[in-house]
Image (cartoon, grey):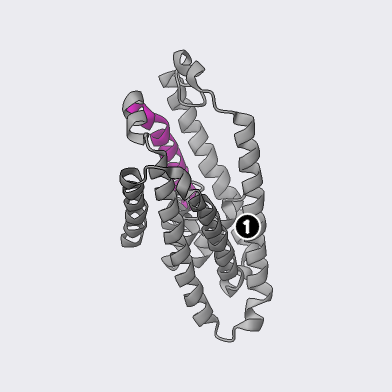
Amino acid sequence: MLYMAKLLAVMFGMYIVAAKLVKDKSKFGFMSGLSTVALYLLIFTMGLRIGSNEEVTSNMASIGLDAVLITVFTVGGSMLCAGIAAKLMGLNKHGLRKSEAEIFTEDDGEKDNGAMKSSIITLLVAALGVFAGYKLVPLIFSDMEAFQNGAGELITAFLYLLLACVGFDLGTEGGIWEKFKSIGLRVLVLPLAISIGTLGFGALYGLISSMSVKETLAIAAGFGWYSLAPAIIMNAGFISASAVSFFAQYI
């Protein structure tokens, strides 16, 4: 819990700094590139640590199956609860009522293409990390425990850097509180429904699988944030659950 609190403190701290002090965000365009570099380094290092762990590699089949099934459970649960909430509130897929739909002008096609490209790149980086961890790390490092500890420290450092960049970027955009106030508490309906469905069905999978409810809840609580959830779970010492979370994000 303290680890998560520190990460959130860094992100929100950088948000406040950027929102209060940055007047010209064009001068900080490099932060987007730094965020991307931090993300790829984080994913690659997690892949190295997972691929070099014998507990993971010797149980890859069961870990892969768990990753698929918990994805089906959590995504299905979130869709079910979000659909029910949207129906009751009369909301469309963007969380808007029909009378508000015309104000939504985002280019979905362009956004989807960008998201697909980013997903492919992160998948390749993850695969490269796992492969290098499995094939190369044992040849280079004789003390695997020292490597695991060192990789864990790097993961924490990259995670802090990534969240600092995210917080800074959000702060330079501004207007979040204004948008929240204009929409009202209704903005919380879909996130709350998704959280209930994801966590509820994640816990359900823990009851019928070989994993504990604690592990499946931790994986579900990542909500698909592939750069955060596996790192936190891994830092807590649940390497197999971290591997399930890591692979589940790409399904």
Which residue sits furthest top? 99
Q: From what the image shows, is residue 9 above or below residue 48?
A: above
Look at mark 1 in the image and give the residue it sits on.
Answer: 64
Q: From what the image shows, is residue 183 above or below residue 99?
A: below
* Magenta highlight range: 184-207
Any magenta on residue 203? yes
* The N terminus: image quadrant: bottom left
Q: Position of residue 89 (x, y in %)?
A: 41, 20
Q: Nearer the viewer, residue 35 or 199?
A: 35
Q: Position of residue 93 (x, y in %)?
A: 52, 26
- Residue at position x 45%, y 71% in the image: 153
Q: Secondary structure at mark 1?
A: helix
What amino acid is found at the position of numbered circle 1 in the picture?
A: Gly
Q: Nearer the viewer, residue 23 or 181?
A: 23
Q: Nearer the viewer, residue 202 or 139?
A: 139
- Residue at position x 63%, y 80% in the image: 138
* Residue 130 occupies quadrant: bottom right
- Residue at position x 48%, y 70% in the image: 154
Q: Position of residue 48 (x, y in %)?
A: 59, 69
Q: From what the image shows, is residue 57 above or below residue 227?
A: below
